[in-house]
Amino acid sequence: MRTRSTMQTVALSLRNTLWLLAALAMVAAPHVERLPWWVSALAAMLLLWRIHLGRSRLPLPRKWLLLIIVAGAAAGIYLHYRTLFGRDAGVTLLIVMLALKTLETNSQRDGILLIFLGYFIVITNFLYSQTISTALYMLLCVWVITATMIGLHYTRPHPGYRHQLRSAALLLAQSAPLMLVLFLFFPRVQGPLWGLPQDAFSGVSGMSETMSPGSIINLSLSDAVAFRVEFKSPVPAQRNLYWRGPVMWNFNGRTWTARPYLYYFGELRFDADNPAVDYSVTLEPHNDRWLFALDLPVTIPPTAVITRDFHLRSREPLTSRIRYDMKSYPGYRLGLDETPDMRQRALQLPPDTNPRAAEFGRRLREKFADDRALMGEVLAMFRNEKFFYTLDPPPLGEHPVDDFLFKTRSGFCEHYASSFAVLMRAAGIPARVVTGYLGGEINPLGNYMIVRQADAHAWTEVWLAGEGWVRVDPTAAVSPLRIESGAAAAVPQTGPLPMFARGGYAWLKQMRFSWDSLANSWNQWVLGYNPERQRTLLLRAGFDDATWRTLAVILIIATGFITLVLALLMLRKMGRTERDPVRLAYLRFCAKLGRKGLPRSPAEGPQDYALRLARLRPDLAAGIAAITQLYVALRYGSDAGSGTMQSLERQVRKFKA
Amino acid sequence: MYAALKNQLYNWLFQPRGPQTGPIVLVQRRVFILPTRHGMGFAAVLLLMLAGSVNYNLSLGFILTFLLGAMGITAMLHTFRNLANLRLSTGRAQPVFAGSMARFTVCIENTGDSDRYSIGLTRDKHEAEFIDVPARQTVFLGTGVPAPRRGLLAPGRLTLFTRYPLGLYYAWAYLELDMHCVVYPRPAPPGLPLPAMTSSAGQGAEHGQGQEDFFGLRQYHPGDSSRHIAWKAVARDQGLLTKQFSGRADSELWLAWELLPPRMDLEEKLSRLTRWVLDANALGLSFGLRLPDNTIPVASGDAQRGRCLEALALFDAATLK
């Protein structure tokens, strides 16, 4: 029953070692598909080696050997990733270190360290996948790790693995309500807090000053909010919501760039006819300088400047959220008097790139003298031939515009904008690419519009004599839905498996729909829970304009309340509980006397007590004697008879001191 | 000033009450709890995970961090509950010789319905012994206390503690139970000859008990040396009888203080006497012990040994002056 030990240097038992290794292997397993194969093999070998050493009670390897392995693995990882930092290389390094650490883990203290590392590996898995199945699997991992941690704190004899798992499950289950409160009310800050490694979120980021095939696609998969808009005048139609960002003039055959910016210092000059739109924009920080405004802005925020192509730029990089009031004219005529220099700039094409597109443009020019007719021809081609709008376009080769126009023919707004501009330039029509966002979603709760990164868009402007710069959105030709209802609606549903398409699988279909709606809720409420959602939730709960202080108070009260309830539930029934009915009855009798100032002293037996009482209160002697006799008979007698218990209960009940 | 404040705080917090005789129930006021170093480490890991979750906007990272954070709070309740409401009372402490370890045993009664795991008992926070206390059971848990000097040894303040289940918290209760262990003087090295059978003063030596001549049998009393039991009588079903020997009074074995050189160190004398008691008992002799303040009449057996050793252990040096 007993073990004696000094407190810090308890050796790790084989049982605990195996638990630990199993838990770590479980939690690292999902990384295997992403790791270089030799890293997975090395880690598996190291774990097996540790199991072997543990089972045959051999000493652990020397430090210098481990150091050599560390150095070798680090070199290998460097060669593979060309860096030791960033998400992928970092995780790989962590896994190798973890596997090596097991080889020098022989004490309970090191075991705890490995447990903490195990919890940390759980979170690295979320960098890659946050699906429901990942979450469930990781919950299993956390359960096993916690059970391992409990196992480390048993003293022998071990109560068994069932007890270990049950205790861990209980701990986690009891923690769930608190977790929920923390999740909902912990003051959320919009990340990132520090510069992310370059590969941190390939796919989630803001606009860019350059546009090459693939750059906007990455944005389109992100649900992050780009900015929010409150309209003071009626909300323009969805198809007019072109949020103007960097305008790109320079093309190198693959990539469009906005630099250099030509700033505008005179008065803004353009012809506007329709009524103006008044609104204010709250822009999420993106650590760069561009601001967004509806086509075509007329006011310049105090901290901003505007370029000659009407792109607003902040004077300082935006590191925190800003809000600015804007006025725009959706109906406008711009650049009627554009200088020949600028027109020339909008015609440059790098020689020897995309030769087929250039040739195609020249031939169009020969066919059509009228610019409008030429443009109509190209748009008709996009619309009528087999061009597809997809978020997952095939990769493009050395001449991306050629490849797109004549081979793959499936792409995204940037492919269409880029190739359209190239064709225009080849045909001698000045053209430029405008990037920004298109559309937005009205939030009925707050009555404002949310524009997300997924709304990122690219379109073109061409210069026509007598009309100036005219916006042409070639994506609209291919996918009018994109313009009318947003990117998500425009992407065709990846066709269901043929099995689902056939009839007779109604329940399967039903299951698929249920799963889909579950996944949707998961996205909305778990993955999508952000500072914005938190505000909305608090607004619904009646907290207008909740500051972090409100949140802190809610959090403290709720946490305190739940902890208190948990403590009361856990700590009740802790004291001595008497279950013997005979003794209970006798104790009731003693309590009656105790209230009259005649308590039984702890060392006094029932008989002595009865004698003493008889002396002190002769009037009660008969009742006391009867009860004492019954009690003694029941408790110490060999056979008290069946009615004795009831008779004792009755006597005690009747007894009046 | 600072020391006084600290003392005040200590007194208020831990309320030292002095040794207690009755059972101690670990009510909430008596159980203290603090995070361990591992607990601090856990918190640091959680902060790191929180920062990572914010930075990478990992919703599941938040959930994991909050789940583990909540578990950190729940674990505190579990650790506390593991110790709360135990009933502790004094166990036994067998006498030991000075220079060895005394073992104090504490009786732990779990009156509640939940099992308790990995309850440790320690005196110096370095060495501890652990035990599990299942629901509604009573166990004994001991701790070793070095006994450097003869006399009565109190264990001092013992600490009953636990880190179960996660090791993030250390819950403890101080025990000052009224327990004593008799520590006999350290025996002098063996090999000293026993003193000669000395003549007792006076003439009253008609039939003092001695070792030489058998003169009869009497009823066995507990404490009689097993060597003097009349085994033949036992074999004849006459019950346990003790052989009595007549001897001249001067043949009594008196282990006396004054036999030792007067200039000998006090503790040294006690050591010598202790050795004699052990040797005399091992030989099955009847012997008496004479100390300046105390005389133990001649008798034999383990009870006599215990009486004599206890007298030696508790000998008060002040009586010499």
Image (tube, coloured by chain):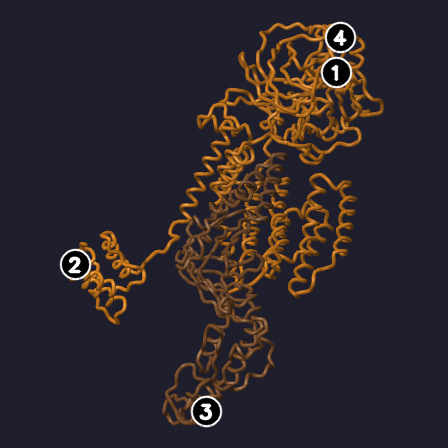
Q: Which mark is residue A620?
A: 2
Give x and y (percent) for residue A179: 50, 40
Q: Secondary structure at mark 4?
A: loop
User: Is residue A44 among the parts visible in the rendering?
Assistant: yes
Q: Amino acid at mark 3?
A: Gly
* Residue with the mark numbered 3: B247
Q: Nearer the viewer, residue A339 or A171?
A: A171
Using a 10 Å C-alpha cutoff, classify the residue at mark 4 as few (fewer than 14 neighbours), some (14 to 19) or many (20 or more). few
* Residue with the mark numbered 1: A431
Horizontal side of A298 relative to A366 (left or right) equals left
Q: How far apart in space, not on screen, are marks 4 and 3 (Cα)? A: 143 Å
**Chain on which label 1 sits:** A
Look at the image and give the colour of chain A: orange
Q: Residue A10 is drawn in which quadrant? A: bottom right
Q: Nearer the viewer, residue A587 or B73?
A: A587
Q: Amino acid at mark 1?
A: Ala
Of pointers 2 and 4, the one earlier in the residue sequence = 4
Using a 10 Å C-alpha cutoff, classify the residue at mark 2 as few (fewer than 14 neighbours), some (14 to 19) or many (20 or more). some
Q: Secondary structure at mark 2?
A: helix
Of pointers 1 and 4, the one earlier in the residue sequence = 4
Dot in front, 4 or 3: 3
Does residue A594 lie above or below A393 as drawn? below
Does residue A472 lie above or below B55 as drawn? above
Q: Nearer the viewer, residue A513 or A339?
A: A339
Chain in brown in the render: B
Q: How far apart in space, not on screen, are marks 2 and 3 (Cα)? A: 66 Å
Dot in front, 2 or 4: 2
